[in-house]
Amino acid sequence: MVESLAALAQGFAVAIQPLNLLFALVGVFLGTIVGVLPGIGPALTVALLLPITYKFDPAGSLIMFAGIYYGGMYGGSTTAILLNAPGESASMATALEGNLMAKAGRGGPALATSAIGSFVAGLIATLGIAMLAPWLVEIAIKFGYEDYFALMVLAFVTVSATFGNDPRKGLVSLFIGLALGLVGLDKLTAQARLGFGVPELLDGIEITTLAVGLFAVGEALYVVSRRRHEPETVEPIKGSIWMSRSDWRRSWKPWLRGTAFGFPIGALPAGGAEIPTFLSYSTERRLAKDKGEFGKGAIEGVAGPEAANNASAAGTLVPLLTLGLPTSATAAMMLAGFQQYNLNPGPLLFAEKPELVWGLIASLFIANVMLLVLNLPLVGLWVRLLAIPRPWLYAGILIFAVTGTVAAKPSPIELGMLALFGVMGFFMRRHGYPIAPVVVGLILGPMAEVQLRRALQAGQGDPLVLVQSPVAATLLALALVALVAPLILKGLSRFRRAED
Amino acid sequence: MQRTGAIHRLAGAVALLTALAAPAAAQLELRLMAPAAPGGGWDQTARSMQSALVASGAAKSVQVVNVAGAGGTIGLAQFINSAKGDGNQLMVSGLVMVGAIIINKAPVTLDRVTPIARLTGESVAIVVPSASPIKDVKGLAAALKADPAKVTWAGGSAGSVDHIAAALFAKAVGADPSKVNYVAHSGGGEALAAMLSGRVTAGVSGYAEVEQQVKSGRLRLLGITSAERLPGVAAPTLKEQGIDVVVVNWRSVMAGPDLPADKRKALADAIEKMVKSPAWAEVLKQKGWENTYLAGDAFAAFLKEEQVRVAEAMKAIGLAK
């Protein structure tokens, strides 16, 4: 611990050099921009910058890449909140309550709580990297297929938080998502499923295409269809654009809980950012004092997932730095960045190049501060977007959605799918089917399927392998409790009422 | 508006840097397709070629285009349509595409393109977790012979070079390759995590990806699938340990269909100039790629052999009929 602190102090000495500060600022700025644009993610940006930064010194360019990574994670939430167009799957949970807040004139506090929540989460998680990385990674690599499957079962149980008022309609939505998740080459046997002979479908359905289609395009169509019936009522700003005292009081616990979900799950080699954001969303929904506010724009539902999102981004750096294990597309590009300088992340890097590793960790702190400094003043500017008259705003959203999709995958079929999902989103809204479970099904379904089949394959087909590991058994028990407890409680209260 | 401005500035910086690095010699203005998303092996090959082609003066400018999807076969189909007889278009390809064409039942194959040259290769390593009772290749062979289904392998996606290597290994030691219990993973990192978690018997992966774990003692390296020992790598090859398996994940560069002889020669000369340049040597060193340069008819013949070999391996695994 003391050693780590001393090393971290030295790291700060590296990171605080003016040139490195400049690199961090450039990285954070670029990251925020590419995060805001759907389609251009941090991974692509780092890939394009790699050949240019080759001439720079390693510390500087790695610091810049880390800034891009953090900035991208943050930027995605801005469009999710303002335009209901999540730039990446990790921002989906943020869009649920965040966009509702923005529509109710509370876009300012929503953006602020996501900026400050990202900052708090990033700070704690970076501290976690500095203090716990070598220890955490030993646990993380022990995670096997059955443990991941159990974690996903737990995540599935919490999906009902996105169902809305009618569980049957929620299940219909979820199963549409699960069916969409089957499209493409099967990951384990390479057999085409639901491909209909279209080569573009062999890679499966892109999560961002589905999310942007259902959320943004579907909503634009819906708003157009209601235009004659309802007068314009969107108020761009209601009350202060800053967080009120009660906003702070309601945000700080979700920030901390979100971090507690995000960092450890992000550190797992196959953890990802989606599961912790969903877990955080459903936890906040369950713990909220005023349950009626969820579904109308509750600040807890923005604060928690945003913190989880950023904490998991920091978490993925744990296996990258300690083992050289890239667990996300951006981490894989950063690994390529390391290798460009003949540096190999892993246990040896901490011993061979401590100034570089600790400089990078220190610059993560600095990137966090810069993100806050850069983004808080922008909140006032962003919310003004909502003051644009609705026809203009939604036309803009459509252009934004289309260009983003085409930028990510330039193919007419992708564009066709976007349109199709948009129409689907329109009809789902029209008939009161919740939209989020479709996307959740598409994300979780294939992950759970693959891990289950791998676990069974490694266990020679014996289903007992699923409960033999203590981690898996505990997680499955938790899932069972989460599933059954509400039913029992409901039954008990009915029983008591009957007694009275 | 600020945003687009910044992107333009960025693009400007890229153009400026490329221009600075270019000596004013060659006339070729190339369009080089990487049939994959940015970041992967083909994209890195394309971007490395881009800088080496310009730096060596073999080409005036090179534009890299990414067309991702279906193991490169979407890019291939597009390339065959657009590059017909065009002496300014190239595409990165390789062993992975040979396999993907079979798995995806792609309508067009590599028979349509004009092979220019094989450029690089990466050997595959066979490893076991350090706690494993299997100490060497013979131990793994014995376990496979006893019951191939009980030996679980972790590696890249189904039908990948890793998967083919595992199947060829089983076949070479006399086990039934269709019974190989291969657990596919979508990326090198995920497969590596599975090997470290100790849930599988053995792992197959590009050597560079496991190098650090082997050095730190978490994984034990049993052998490498190269034909000869790699410089700087202590591990013995499978061949010298009596198991006749040589698999190299080679990458190559192809030109469009129906290319006139003079245009083909111009492209082949430019690639040869690049391969012999110090810039390319630096790229190979940096990325840890083996130099497997093979051009012209010799490469075309090699490609035919590999197509047959991969098709047979896929049949043996049961991935193709």
Image (cartoon, rainbow, N blue to C red):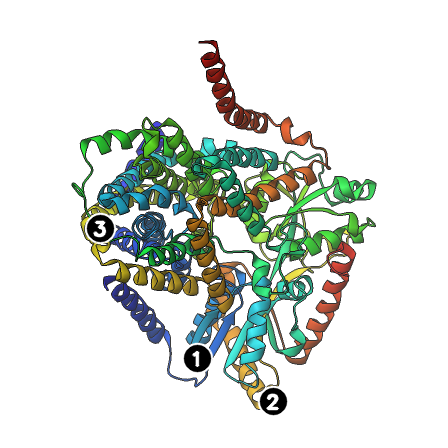
Q: Judging from the image, what secondary structure is the residue with disc 2 in? A: helix
Residue B240 visible from this viewpoint? no
> Same chain, marks 3 and 2?
no
Q: Secondary structure at mark 1?
A: loop
Give the residue drawn at x 69%, y 60%: B227
Q: Is residue A283 above or below residue B30?
A: above
Give the percent coordinates (x, y) of residue B279.
Answer: 46, 70
Instruction: Please state the chain letter of the residue tagged with numbered disc 2 in the rendered image.
Output: B
In terms of depth relative to the viewer, which is nearer, A466 or A137? Answer: A466
Task: Give the number of the mark in front: 3 or 2.
Answer: 3
Can you identify the residue that label 2 sits on? B261
Q: Residues within 10 Å of mark 3 (few under 14, many from 20)?
A: many
Label 3 belongs to which residue? Answer: A383
Residue type at mark 1: give it: Gly
Determine the CA span between mark 2 and mark 1: 22 Å
> How far, Cα to Cα, is label 3 from label 2?
61 Å
Q: Earlier in the sequence, mark 2 or mark 1?
A: 1
Q: Are marks 3 and 1 on the same chain?
A: no
Query: Which residue is nearer to you in this view: B2 or A17?
Result: B2
Residue that lies at the very extreme toward the front in this rendered image? A229
State the image coordinates of residue B69 (x, y, percent, origin top left): 55, 63
User: Residue beneath label 1, please?
Assistant: B57
Callout 3: chain: A
Tell me residue A398's x, y (percent).
35, 62
The single residue placed furthest to the left in the displayed view is: A240
Q: Which quadrant would residue B297 be assigned to in this image?
A: bottom right
Task: Chain letter for mark 1, please.
Answer: B
Q: CA distance from mark 3 to mark 1?
A: 51 Å
Residue type highlighted by circle 3: Val
